[in-house]
Image: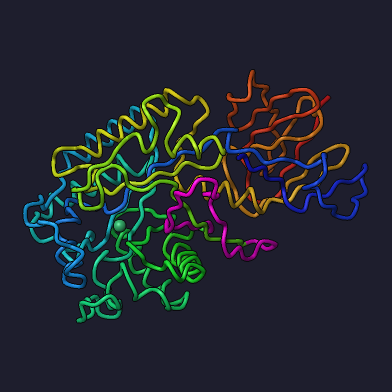
């Protein structure tokens, strides 16, 4: 099913005088917010990646110490490294095919060593080269996330040492996070982000390892918001926590804890939802996947068409050891098949970073519109690219005034050709796509 959203708190006025706010959700005069560039956002989430270290090899024995019955994989026969030659091959294919996504850089991967210092088993040069690849070749199209600090043991952030107990209460994947305050989680997340900052990365968000914060999402949201602001100065933070694969259930990003919307320093935290399981190669690189579960060979079935046709963001997920699949690249080959099928089936997708999607949803939910006979004014606490709105009336030759500048919008030939600063007219409606700046913007007809 397609969900329609409208700008909040829209008021309509006759020339000059603003009428009191009316509920426009039930009104034909509502301004509808379409998807970014009127396309369905797509994003590929990679978990458990870092520099060089195969997190499955080092993580499984630590998980097995806590739950011996559940982690019986023959981890000693896995490769300890996922080589940079594979990272390069993967990134090159993604660049050629326009893929964007999220790439984790676990800061202290399975307690082996520190991305901003050294990792035992590799030379300093090998680590530097590996970081450089992700910084220079991945970062333009991929959000870089921490995945807490180690993805295994909880670290005492006062000492930098893991707590002594190997129990669920002191593993990042399980209990430790479930009853912590927003401040405690925020400090822990900030610690993980500081390591990445020192290793030369910029982060707008984080990924949760395993069940981290699964029963404590409001505090996780606030803690992430605090940490991303503290370390990187970003006002729209995001985090990847939940996966929803049930048909018909919304997978839209959830904009949480908006604060300071009326002032000069608004912020929020956006929960990004993945809509698939890892059907590539598993977190351990030992669980064979199936492209048909994402999208079938006839391009009709599978989870991704279901979500794309509901016009919600199609964010799908893998784990890096399963993409490499111990050198067999099974997950990577499934991924190529899935992307090729998506591109064959759809002409209305737009690959976006999670940061871009998060900004869009924050703007979509919190921009306020006022409509007069002469203009539409937009008050935006959050900026975004590709802000696309459908006005239920004709606006000839629209001009955008924002950020102290005026811009004549350019008419496009169809509803799939939007770029920032364009419009399209059909019947009694005008669809406008613009780069939305924080603060006030005005749309006016230049007849
Ligand atoms: Zn993970």
Q: Position of residue 201 (x, y in %)?
A: 33, 53
Instruction: Name the quadrant of the C terminus.
Output: top right
Q: Which color scheme is applied?
A: rainbow
Choose between 334 and 44: the one closer to the eye: 334
Quarter assignment of residue 155:
bottom left
Q: Where residue 193 sits in the image (x, y, percent)?
A: 35, 63
- Residue at left offset 80%, top offset 46%: 26
Residue 16 appears left or right of 292:
right
Quarter of the rendering containing residue 162: bottom left
Q: Residue at x 36, y 65 (%)?
A: 211
Q: Is residue 244 magenta?
A: yes
Q: Residue at x 45, y 62 (%)?
A: 228
* Residues drawn in magenta: 235-264
Instruction: Give coordinates of residue 237: x percent, y percent.
Output: 49, 58
Judge by depth and name the residue closer to the eye, 355 or 78.
78
Q: Is residue 274 magenta?
A: no
Question: Quick check: 294 above or below 185?
Answer: above
Q: Quadrant of residue 195?
A: bottom left
Give whichever of 51, 435 is nearer the camera: 51
Q: Quadrant of the N terminus?
A: top right
Residue at (26%, 49%) from the top-left corner? 282
**At which x and y percent is residue 206?**
39, 58
Residue lying furthest top: 413
Residue 75, above or below 275: below
């Amino acid at each position: 099913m397609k969900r329609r959203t409208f700008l909040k708190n829209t008021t309509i006025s006759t020339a000059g005088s603003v009428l009191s706010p009316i509920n426009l959700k039930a009104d034909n005069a509502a301004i509808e917010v379409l998807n970014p560039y009127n396309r369905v956002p797509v994003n590929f989430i990679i978990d458990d990646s870092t520099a060089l270290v195969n997190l499955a090899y080092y993580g499984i024995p630590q998980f097995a110490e806590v739950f011996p019955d559940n982690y019986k994989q023959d981890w000693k026969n896995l490769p300890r490294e996922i080589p940079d030659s594979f990272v390069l091959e993967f990134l090159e294919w993604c660049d050629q095919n326009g893929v964007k996504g999220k790439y984790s850089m676990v800061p202290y991967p399975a307690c082996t060593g520190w991305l901003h210092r050294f990792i035992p088993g590799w030379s300093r040069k090998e680590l530097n080269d590996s970081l450089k690849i992700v910084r220079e070749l991945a970062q333009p199209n991929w959000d870089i996330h921490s995945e807490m600090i180690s993805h295994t043991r909880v670290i005492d952030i006062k000492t930098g040492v893991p707590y002594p107990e190997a129990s669920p209460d002191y593993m990042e994947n399980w209990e430790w996070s479930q009853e912590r305050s927003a401040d405690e989680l925020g400090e822990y997340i900030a610690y993980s982000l500081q390591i990445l900052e020192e290793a030369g990365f910029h982060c707008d968000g984080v990924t949760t390892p395993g069940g981290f914060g699964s029963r404590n999402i409001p505090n996780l949201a606030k803690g992430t918001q605090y940490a991303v602001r503290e370390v990187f100065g970003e006002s729209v933070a995001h985090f990847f926590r939940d996966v929803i694969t049930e048909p018909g259930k919304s997978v839209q990003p959830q904009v949480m804890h908006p604060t300071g919307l009326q002032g000069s320093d608004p912020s929020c935290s956006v929960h990004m939802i993945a809509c698939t399981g890892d059907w590539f190669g598993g977190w351990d690189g030992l669980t064979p996947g199936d492209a048909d579960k994402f999208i079938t060979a006839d391009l009709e079935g599978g989870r991704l068409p279901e979500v794309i046709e509901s016009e919600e963001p199609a964010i799908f997920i893998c784990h890096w050891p399963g993409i490499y699949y111990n050198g067999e690249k099974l997950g990577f080959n499934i991924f190529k098949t899935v992307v090729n099928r998506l591109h064959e089936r759809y002409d209305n997708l737009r690959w976006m970073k999670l940061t871009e999607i998060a900004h869009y949803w924050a703007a979509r939910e919190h921009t306020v519109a006022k409509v007069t006979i002469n203009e539409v004014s937009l008050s935006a606490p959050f900026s975004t690219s590709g802000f696309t709105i459908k006005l239920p009336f004709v606006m000839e030759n629209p001009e955008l005034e924002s950020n102290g500048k005026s811009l004549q919008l350019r008419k496009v030939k169809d509803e799939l050709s939007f770029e920032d600063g364009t419009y399209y007219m059909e019947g009694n409606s005008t669809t406008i796509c613009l780069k939305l700046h924080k603060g006030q913007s005005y749309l006016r007809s230049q007849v």
